[in-house]
Structures are given as structure tokens and as C-alpha cells.
């Protein structure tokens, strides 16, 4: 039964907290289908198939389990949350309720017999490694990257495959005893047995209450939206949950894009993830290469959003930002956006003249000559409007998405851009150009993409779950629909909402600027638009520059805090379906109210 009896095992089983969830409101329930699902938290992720079982469990970038199933089981229904799941399994011995929870230290699984379930069950495990020992409640598998440790209580009857480890995979069957109402499994790993035991003790304290608490905090302190439309409200929360989990997964998920052109290449995807994490309000560090265009943009946005002085290395990279291949215009909009953001981030430290030099270089990049038709050799292109040929659709749509001043022409997009980054970038571009209904329709399609193959799984090309595509959800929401731009050093927050005409209420919380959080509430009653703003935290009041794009009746009047107010109202713009843009400044030293209609 053991392939190497000299391997030590823990002296006694570690108590594992019972699982009763998911019980959080951020959950997705449906009949099981043969499609993938992902459970993820920082540092640990699980991939499975709804109708089968666990296909892989990764911990800190390494494979912990290569498979986990109940032999002969089929799944009827699933309930999914970002870090946990519950599945109804039908087996020859009766019905089981399977609960799964991923935590920073690994996986906790629980099988509870339902109704008249009886008889023994076979649990099939696949683990990377070369040598294995199973005894009592423990299975230990050793490989070149450390020790994998599995505990099952009550203790099963173990059976190792005779060829276990010869091909780098240990195959194990654990026969779960009949009559036991609940069986629990914990799986983790460490550099040695002591490290694996310590991780197993941490798993003993993992429970849904903690996961649910983290999700409540996610919605309370991270960017969150409440419209009453679950697809939008929960879609944003799912995207941010997936994004936070991906931040601890390392570079592997991005390297799958190797060989793709900018902005879909690995460096580009890292940049999108960093920008999405910043926008969502996560505390994760911006781990990107500042010598790449989106990496430089993320570094600059981090400095302005958090009010921090850029490091000497970042300052040098930002001030010296320029495209390494000027003949390729695809990266020019991103470099221009990085230079503009870098100028804003560095101006308090290097002075206005040098910052203006950076802005002039950005203008030159955007207004430079377009690439000749003969030079167009891209293998991946964003779609063009009505099939018309233009010199550089990627540059055009990025210029609109990144809201570059002086950009020319509308963003090119067909009726149905490919799912993933392309669709989200098209939505963002249209919203920035004032084509609100079209932009929102594309954004809603991108939200639906996240649930097409399973809850919160944003696909892109051959990737079932792409964190860069998920990162575009908070980016399009904050910068496209809300027109948000923050400069924490000067305490200024610009909000320029471009809301669909059918919306009559909206609450957005978690809009971050420095050490402050801003909440915006919106209601519409007939032709009157009412907004309310609240600053939560922060040492000094934020100056809100409010520039909504609204449908207004002739002679509309504005009020601030219930008193008549003079507001700068621009002329209605044909390209925005006749909407006019207002402008007013409000210091958020108290709750502020603004209405117009």
C-alpha cells in the first residue's frame, strides 16, 4: 500500500471546520452542464467541470492536484461563488452534497450524504509527484517541488496505483466508509512535511464565513454598482473577485498569449490587469514592466490615484517613455496615454515645463502620420465599421478607449466584436465618444460573456478564463460609464457620467482617490436628474468636478443642496443623441446633492 514506508506522516489528524455554504449573496445557481468552472482566491485556484469534478488545483503557481472525483458520480445542480461551490452528486450509493472551498493554504472539500444515501464511495485523486505513502487519514506525495499532503476524515481505505509516480503522477483511490454522514478532505503542500503540516493547520480554520466576509468587504470597499439588474451588479463583483484572485497567480495566465500582437500580448494583458486592479480599488501592488506602454500607463495611474510620488526608477521610465518601434502605430495611443498620465503624476515633482514637454510628445505621437496600407501586416485586427478599410483600427479604437485628446474619427467596430478584450475595448471607446447606447449594449454583452461558459469566466480567444478580459469590466464601468479620473495629489476627482437613457437609478460605491472613497447615487424622475455624493474617509475633502452628459428639457434648472445654482451647460451634441454636458465643482466637505431638470 505504501511505495516508500520511510516517509513520515503527521502524528494525528487536524480538525477541519465544517462547510455549509456557499451562503453569500454573490452566488450563481443552475443545472449542471458540461462546462468549466473556476474557484479562486489569492494564491489558490481550482478548475473543474460542472458535470464531472475537479480537473486541477493550483497553489502558489504550482499544481497541487491533477484531479479529484467521486467514481461513478454525476452532477445535477451547482451553486457557485468566487471561492466556493456546492454540487449535488448522484452516485450508485445515493445522493451526496459536495462542498468545495479554496483558501490561501489549499482546498477543503466535504461530502454529506443526503436522504437515504448508503454504501461505500470511491474518491479518485491524481497528484503530481514521484513517491507516495498513504496511511490512516493521511496521503503524502513527494516531488521535486516539495511535499503534498492530503487528509481525509474519517480515515478511508487507501489504494495506490501500482505504477504510482512512474510518469510523474500518483493515482490514488480512497474508499470512503459506509455509514459516515460527513467526510472531509483537506489538501495542501509545503517545501517539506513541517511546512505542509503548518499549511494544513491553517486550512483547519478556513470556512465560508471568512470567504463571505471577504466578499462583503469586496463589495463595500471595492468598486461596486447597484442598479437592480443582477447581470450588471453581480457581473462587476464577479469580475473584481476573479481579478483579485488572478493577481496572486503569477505570470502563467498571461504567457498563454505569447505571440499575439499588442495589446493582446502577455505584457499588454499584464497592463490591463494592473489597470483593472487599480480601478477596482484593490490593494495589490502594480507589478508590471514600466518600459512597456500599458505598464508605464499603469505606473502613472497608480501614482495619481494614490497620491504617491513615483519612485526614481518609475520617474525615469515615465519621463523617458516612447515607443521602441515608431514605425508601428499600434502602440502609439498607449504610449501617448502613458506620457499624459506620467506628466500628471510627475508635474508636482518635476515642474510644469518638463511635464508640458511630455504632453507635447504625447500630442505628437497621436497626430503622427498613419501607417501606410502596405505596412498593415497584423494577424489580429479589431473590426472595422461596415467593412471599410482604415489604416490602423487598433490605434483608432485604443485612442478612443484611452480618451486621448485630439483623436480623429469614431472608433471602428462592427455589430458583434469578438468576445474578450476586443468587445470590451469597443464598448469603452464608444462610451468615451458619447455613443452611449451603443457602448452600453457592447458592455452588457461583455458582462454576459462572463457567464457564457460558467460564472465569472471571461473568455478571450482560446482562454476560458482571461483575467485581462475580466479587468476590462471595472475599467469600462469607471472610465467609460462614469468618466472617472482622479488626481489625489491635488485632491481632484472628475466624474462625467454617461448613463443609458433607460436607467432611472444607480448607486456606485468604492470610487477611490488617495485615502478617500466616494459614493455616487443617481435617480431620475421624468425629466429631472438627481445626484447625491458622499465622501467616506480621507484627511481632506475631495474637490469633485462633475460633468454629466444628460438629456435636458429646454429651460432646465439646477439646484445644489436644494438651492438654485448657476451651472455651465454646453450645447447639445448631435453625436451624443442631443445630450448636453454640464459642469459644476463641489467640495465634498459634506454630503452634497445636485439636481437638474
Image (cartoon, grey):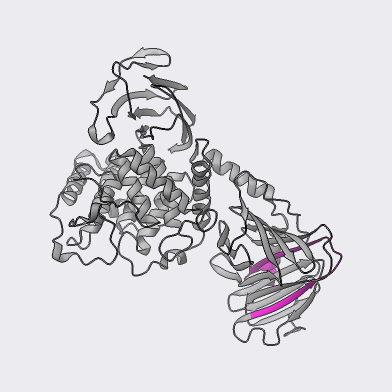
Does residue 124 appear in this view? yes
- Looking at the rendered image, the quarter that the C terminus falls into is top left
Q: Position of residue 253 (x, y in %)?
A: 46, 64
The image quadrant of residue 514 is top left
Does residue 313 appear in this view? no
Residue occupying image coordinates x 18% and y 56%:
390
The image quadrant of residue 256 is bottom left
Q: Position of residue 199 (x, y in %)?
A: 67, 63
Residue occupying image coordinates x 66% and y 70%:
68
Nearest the eye: 523 or 153: 523
Residue 182 on the magenta segment: yes
Q: Position of residue 448 (x, y in %)?
A: 47, 50
Nearest the eye: 553 or 170: 553
Residue 265 on the magenta segment: no
Span colored in magenta = 170-196
The image quadrant of residue 182 is bottom right
The residue sitting at the top extreme is: 563
Residue occupying image coordinates x 30% and y 41%:
432
Nearest the eye: 3 or 156: 156
Amino acid at each position: 500500500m505504501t511505495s516508500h514506508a520511510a516517509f513520515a506522516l503527521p502524528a494525528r489528524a487536524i480538525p477541519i471546520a465544517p462547510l455549509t455554504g456557499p451562503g453569500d449573496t454573490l452566488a450563481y445557481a443552475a443545472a449542471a452542464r458540461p462546462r468549466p468552472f473556476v474557484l479562486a482566491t489569492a494564491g489558490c485556484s481550482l478548475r473543474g467541470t460542472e458535470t464531472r469534478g475537479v480537473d486541477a488545483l493550483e497553489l502558489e503557481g504550482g499544481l497541487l492536484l491533477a484531479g479529484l472525483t467521486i467514481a461513478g458520480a454525476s452532477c445535477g445542480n451547482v451553486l457557485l461563488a468566487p471561492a466556493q461551490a456546492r454540487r449535488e452528486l448522484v452516485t450508485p450509493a445515493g445522493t451526496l452534497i459536495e462542498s468545495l472551498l479554496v483558501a490561501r493554504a489549499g482546498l477543503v472539500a466535504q461530502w454529506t450524504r443526503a436522504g437515504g444515501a448508503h454504501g461505500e464511495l470511491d474518491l479518485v485523486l491524481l497528484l503530481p509527484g514521484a513517491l507516495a505513502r498513504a496511511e490512516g487519514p493521511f496521503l503524502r506525495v513527494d516531488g521535486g517541488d516539495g511535499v503534498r499532503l492530503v487528509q481525509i476524515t474519517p480515515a478511508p481505505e487507501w489504494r495506490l496505483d501500482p505504477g504510482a509516480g512512474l510518469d510523474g503522477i500518483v493515482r490514488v483511490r480512497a474508499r470512503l466508509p459506509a455509514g459516515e454522514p460527513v467526510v472531509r478532505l483537506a489538501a495542501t503542500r509545503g517545501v517539506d512535511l513541517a511546512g505542509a503540516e503548518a499549511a494544513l493547520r491553517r486550512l483547519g480554520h478556513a470556512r465560508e464565513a471568512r470567504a463571505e466576509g471577504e466578499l462583503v468587504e469586496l463589495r463595500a470597499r471595492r468598486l461596486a454598482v447597484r442598479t437592480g439588474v443582477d447581470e450588471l451588479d453581480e457581473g462587476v463583483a464577479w469580475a473584481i473577485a476573479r481579478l483579485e484572485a488572478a493577481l496572486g497567480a503569477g505570470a502563467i495566465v498571461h504567457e498563454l498569449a505569447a505571440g499575439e500582437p499588442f495589446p493582446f500580448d502577455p505584457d499588454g494583458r499584464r497592463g490591463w490587469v494592473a489597470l483593472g486592479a487599480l480601478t477596482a480599488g484593490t490593494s495589490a501592488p502594480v507589478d508590471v514592466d514600466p518600459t512597456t506602454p500599458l505598464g508605464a500607463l499603469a505606473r502613472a495611474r497608480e501614482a495619481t490615484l494614490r497620491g504617491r510620488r513615483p519612485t526614481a526608477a518609475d520617474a525615469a521610465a515615465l519621463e523617458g517613455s516612447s515607443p521602441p518601434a515608431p514605425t508601428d502605430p499600434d502602440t502609439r495611443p498607449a504610449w501617448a496615454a502613458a506620457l499624459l498620465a506620467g506628466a500628471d503624476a510627475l508635474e508636482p515633482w518635476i515642474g510644469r515645463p518638463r511635464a508640458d514637454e511630455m504632453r507635447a510628445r504625447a500630442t505628437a505621437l497621436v497626430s503622427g502620420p498613419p501607417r501606410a496600407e502596405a505596412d498593415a501586416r497584423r494577424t489580429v485586427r479589431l473590426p472595422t465599421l461596415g467593412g471599410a478599410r482604415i489604416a490602423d483600427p487598433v490605434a483608432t479604437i485604443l485612442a478612443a478607449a484611452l480618451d486621448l485628446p485630439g483623436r480623429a474619427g469614431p472608433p471602428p467596430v462592427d455589430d458583434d466584436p469578438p468576445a474578450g478584450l476586443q468587445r470590451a475595448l469597443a464598448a469603452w471607446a464608444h462610451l468615451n465618444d458619447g455613443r452611449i447606447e451603443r457602448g452600453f449594449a457592447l458592455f452588457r454583452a461583455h458582462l454576459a460573456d462572463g457567464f457564457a461558459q460558467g460564472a465569472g469566466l471571461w473568455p478571450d480567444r482560446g482562454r476560458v478564463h482571461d483575467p485581462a478580459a475580466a479587468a476590462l469590466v471595472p475599467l469600462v464601468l469607471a472610465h467609460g460609464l462614469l468618466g472617472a479620473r482622479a488626481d489625489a495629489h491635488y485632491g481632484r476627482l472628475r466624474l462625467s457620467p454617461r448613463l443609458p437613457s433607460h436607467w432611472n437609478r444607480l448607486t456606485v460605491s468604492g470610487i477611490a482617490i488617495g485615502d478617500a472613497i466616494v459614493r455616487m447615487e443617481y435617480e431620475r424622475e421624468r425629466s429631472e436628474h438627481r445626484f447625491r455624493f458622499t465622501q467616506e474617509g480621507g484627511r481632506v475633502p475631495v474637490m469633485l468636478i462633475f460633468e454629466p452628459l444628460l438629456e435636458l428639457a429646454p429651460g432646465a434648472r439646477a439646484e445644489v443642496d436644494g438651492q438654485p445654482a448657476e451651472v455651465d451647460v454646453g450645447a447639445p451634441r448631435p453625436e451624443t443623441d442631443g445630450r448636453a454636458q454640464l459642469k459644476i465643482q463641489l467640495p465634498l466637505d459634506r454630503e452634497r446633492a445636485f439636481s437638474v431638470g
